[in-house]
Image (spheres, helix red, strand yellow):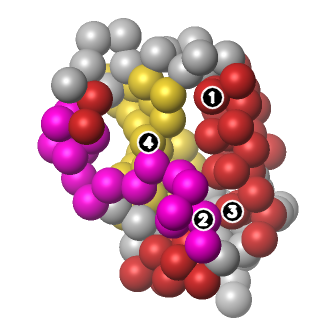
Amino acid sequence: MPQGPLTIETLPGPQPNSATLRLHGPLLVNNLFRLRDTLQSSDAPLLVIDLADVPYMDSGGLGVLINGYVSRQNRGRRIAFIAPSPSVKALMKMTRVDSVLPIFDSVDQVKVASA
């Protein structure tokens, strides 16, 4: 598979003082470090990660999402993942992280779950 760039677009989140990170491109071991650093440095009480434009990810990409979840939980911060593409959703299901990570179809579902 081609190893294209990963871009991260920062947008307002669904709640005050929250943020959304919209990812564009594959999430791979060779391009995940900026995302890792962004996840670790964000102080937003709720961080939403939009995976709709991530066509695929490898185990390194999945690892950074899991580590981001654990790190934020340990700091009393929440994270939610929305709209994973079909291949990303399949990887999450196959590895069973879909039973651990808070994954939603839309930002509206995150709003309801956070209320």
Q: Is residue 112 above or below residue 54?
A: above
Give me the C-alpha separation between circle 4 and circle 3: 14 Å
Q: Quadrant of the N terminus?
A: bottom right
Q: Earlier in the sequence, mark 2 or mark 3?
A: 3
Give me the C-alpha separation between circle 2 and circle 3: 9 Å
The residue that disc 3 covers is: 62
Q: Verify CB contact (< 8 Å) between mark 3 and mark 1.
A: no
Q: What's the residue at 71%, 61% (across, down)?
A: 61
Which of discs 1 and 4 lies nearer the camera? The answer is: 1
Circle 2: residue type: Val
Circle 1: residue type: Gln
Q: Verify CB contact (< 8 Å) between mark 1 and mark 4.
A: no
Q: Verify CB contact (< 8 Å) between mark 2 and mark 3.
A: yes
Mark 2 surroundings: few (<14), some (14-19) or many (≥20) residues within 10 A: some
Which mark is drawn over residue 42?
none
- State left or right for residue 9 relative to residue 60: left
Q: Earlier in the sequence, mark 4 or mark 3?
A: 3
Which of discs 2 and 4 lies nearer the camera? The answer is: 2
Q: What's the residue at 72%, 31% (across, down)?
A: 71
Q: Earlier in the sequence, mark 3 or mark 1?
A: 3
Range covered by the magenta-colored residues: 96-112
Mark 3 surroundings: few (<14), some (14-19) or many (≥20) residues within 10 A: many
Circle 3: residue type: Leu
The residue that disc 2 covers is: 97
Q: Quadrant of the C terminus?
A: top left
- State left or right for residue 33 relative to residue 56: right
